Amino acid sequence: MIPGSASLISINTLVAPFNPLVMALLRSRFHALASKTLLVVSWSGRKTGRRFSIPTGYQRDADDVVVLLSKPSEKTWWKNFRSPWPADLLIERRERTAMGELVRPGSSEFFRLVEQTIEAMPFMAKQFGLAGYDPARGLSAEDRARLCESAAAIR
């Protein structure tokens, strides 16, 4: 690090070492401590066929489960779902099979899901680069452009 320079550490870098612990918690009888907002998603890679599992935040949208990612350029797992792809979800200690698919960035559904998330969890606005977001005003054209780069949604 250069003296006087700001070192930005990604939230992903900070939480990744805790993923095995979080998955163990979500699989345990103590899952209720975190399972209302976190799930385990498991899938086989499109190219490698390798099996992957990660904990991630989620929300419900009617009968669907939605995973909204901040900083998708720092993650690769979601790319498996650019078109429909099977996944297994562990939600509230129950296994479910799902077909995940990317919600098209820039679509009205994409922006609705982002706003729904920010209304439920206002701290997420900063994660998406929307520090000045005002729910009464809604998303500006600049906010929408930023979101297409700083967020991804998998349904």
Image: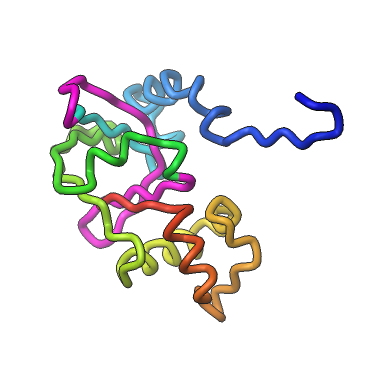
Does the magenta stretch mainly form a helix, a strand or a loop?
strand
Instruction: Report if residue 49 lies within the magenta region.
Output: yes
Residue at 50% across / 75% down in the picture? 141
Q: Split into 4 quadrants, where in the image is the N terminus?
A: top right
Q: Which residues are the magenta region?
A: 46-71
Q: Is residue 52 left or right of residue 150?
A: left
Q: Position of residue 70 (x, y in %)?
A: 47, 47
Q: Between 81 and 90, which is closer to the camera in this rendering?
A: 81
Q: Between 76 and 61, which is closer to the camera in this rendering?
A: 76
Considering every residue shown, the one lying at the far bottom of the view is 137
Residue at 43% across / 25% down in the picture? 22
Q: Is residue 23 above or below residue 104?
A: above
Q: Is residue 83 left or right of residue 35?
A: left
Residue at 56% across / 80% down in the picture? 137
Residue at 20% across / 28% down in the picture? 45
Q: Position of residue 145 (x, y in %)?
A: 47, 66
